[in-house]
Amino acid sequence: MSETPMGGDRQDPGSPDSRDWFAPPLDQPADMDITYTGPPPQPPSIPIPGTLRPVGDLRVWPALSEEEHTMTVPFPAVPGTRVELPAHYRRPSPPAPPPPPARKKMSRGRRRVLLGSGAFLSVAAAIAFPLWFARGVYEYGRPSDHIHIVKPKQAATWQHVSWRVALWPIADPGPSAKPDPSRQWMKVVVTRTALDGEGAIRHGTPDVKLTDGSGRTWLAQLVNDTTPSATAENKVGTLYKIELMGVVPTSVADKIEVLVRPSITRDVPGQSFDDSMKASVTTEEKQDQVLRFTR
């Protein structure tokens, strides 16, 4: 005889105890409707002592008199019973603003002209502003020159240095060069003399060019410079020569003048490289002074 999982004896399938726990009893009819159709259950009623009354507005102060009613809702205004203030108590009402004038409709042709003009001005401004800015930067870095006219065979003094210039035509220095009647070689000798200690530290190489009366310029190539490179070797009152050569058209060879632009570099003894760079940036002196030696 086998045992049940719970350890009890297995019952006969036909016995009453072998049915499911939720099965109806055997004496209940099979067609019996057990659905509940009564009212839904209600929560238990808990009695509250006292009586409730509707909450309304209550005036605390001043106290109500017997003649006053207790209604707080105002009566609606009856039309025609409002009392107007006298004229001298009433504020004058501001005058109504005049209606805006009718806007005149713009013609299509005029509208196109205005749109085209605005587009043209926008493009012109977009092009002109970068050019104007670039020109301002160029003029700041290279301002307009200040020309100092020096008479023939005269010396010019600038920034503690005395300058002189000599100029004459020479033959073509090339040994195998063929003669060219349209070109003329010129030799330039620029002499410099320091007048004091400040002039001695201003021994930078000047910029030298050849020019004519119409404003044309030609380069002058440096050939030899006897100016010492060290400040300690520059002697006050000593003449140092700078030799240059250039080529100009033959037609203006007898009208050539010399332009000398002195250097603004100051070689201060004992000054470090960093201090020298800072001084070159912060200085207000500009290399815009030009000595023009005429003939």
Image (cartoon, rainbow, N blue to C red):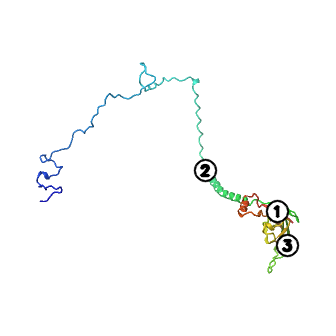
Q: Is residue 89 above or below residue 290?
A: above
Farthest residue toward the bottom?
176
Q: Residues within 10 Å of mark 3 (few under 14, many from 20)?
A: some
Name the amino acid, label 1. Gly
Q: Amino acid at mark 3?
A: Pro
- What residue does disc 1 label? 197
Which residue is tagged 2? 111
Quarter of the view holding residue 245: bottom right
Q: Which residue position is annotated with label 3? A: 169
Q: Is residue 284 left or right of residue 94?
A: right
Figure check: 37 above or below 259: above
Q: Secondary structure at mark 1?
A: helix
Give the mark nearer the N terminus: 3 vs 2: 2
Compare marks 2 and 1 and give the one earlier in the sequence: 2
Asked whether disc 3 touches disc 2, contact meaning CB atoms under 8 Å apart, the reply is no
Where in the figure is residue 292, as x and y percent of width and height?
83, 63
Q: Which residue lies most toward the right here?
A: 153
The residues tagged by marks 3 and 2 sit, at their Cα atoms, a distance apart of 69 Å
Q: In the figure, is residue 254 to the left or right of 102? A: right
133 left or right of 224 in image: left
Q: Quadrant of residue 36?
A: top left
